[in-house]
Image (spheres, rainbow, N blue to C red):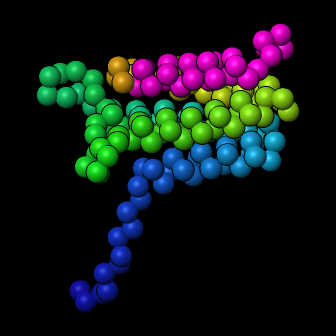
């Protein structure tokens, strides 16, 4: 009855994303391609599961997702923007490491396909985000990577 209140810890979705992305970031920094591939697979599963849980039917009877709704923060970024900005950073590192191993680039490129394939249904913003991410990898890599080795 008079037990002390426990402090409620707010676990933010961005913290969860950082956990999964951080492992992939560490493995690419240490140039461990096998571990990077495994971490991206875990990341794709986590992204897909989180996005599936946050899906709902809106008032217009259309599929919607909490990930794409604007937040109340100053910049109004949504969670999908948070995910994709982290993926962007990983993609940049993968492109930088291409001379060491092309597997980082290939694994990063397939991350977007894995996320898409593991979802039953996506909202338009999710599809656009995945296409933009894959496009970024291809277009940025085009100027950096020797096409004869792809």
Instruction: Determine if the magenta segment contains residue 39.
Output: no
Residue 111, how many percent across, how many down?
61, 27
User: Position of 138 compared to 71: left or right?
Assistant: right
Residue 134, how many percent across, how many down?
57, 21
Q: Can residue 118 be seen here?
A: no
Seen at 80% across and 16% down, the residue is 146
Q: Is residue 67 above or below residue 137?
A: below
Q: Quadrant of the N terminus?
A: bottom left
Seen at 76% across and 20% down, the residue is 145
Q: How many marks?
A: 0
Seen at 63% across and 18% down, the residue is 138
Q: Can residue 35 be seen here?
A: yes
User: Position of 129 compared to 110: left or right?
Assistant: left
Work out whether residue 111 or residue 97 is closer to the camera in this orientation and state it: 97
Q: Is residue 95 above or below residue 76?
A: above
Residues in magenta, as a range: 126-150
Seen at 78% across and 12% down, the residue is 147
């Amino acid at each position: 009855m008079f037990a002390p209140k426990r402090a409620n810890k707010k676990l933010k979705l961005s913290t969860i994303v950082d956990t999964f992305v951080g492992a992939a970031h560490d493995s690419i920094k240490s140039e461990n391609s096998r571990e990077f591939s495994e971490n991206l697979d875990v990341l794709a599963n986590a992204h897909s599961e989180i996005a599936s849980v946050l899906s709902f039917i809106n008032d217009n009877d259309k599929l919607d997702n909490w990930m794409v709704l604007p937040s109340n923060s100053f910049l109004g970024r949504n969670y999908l923007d948070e995910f994709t900005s982290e993926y962007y950073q990983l993609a940049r590192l993968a492109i930088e490491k291409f001379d060491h191993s092309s597997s980082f680039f290939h694994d990063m490129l397939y991350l977007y396909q894995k996320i898409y394939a593991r979802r039953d249904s996506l909202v338009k913003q999710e599809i656009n985000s995945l296409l933009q991410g894959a496009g970024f990898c291809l277009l940025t890599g085009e100027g950096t990577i020797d096409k004869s080795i792809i």
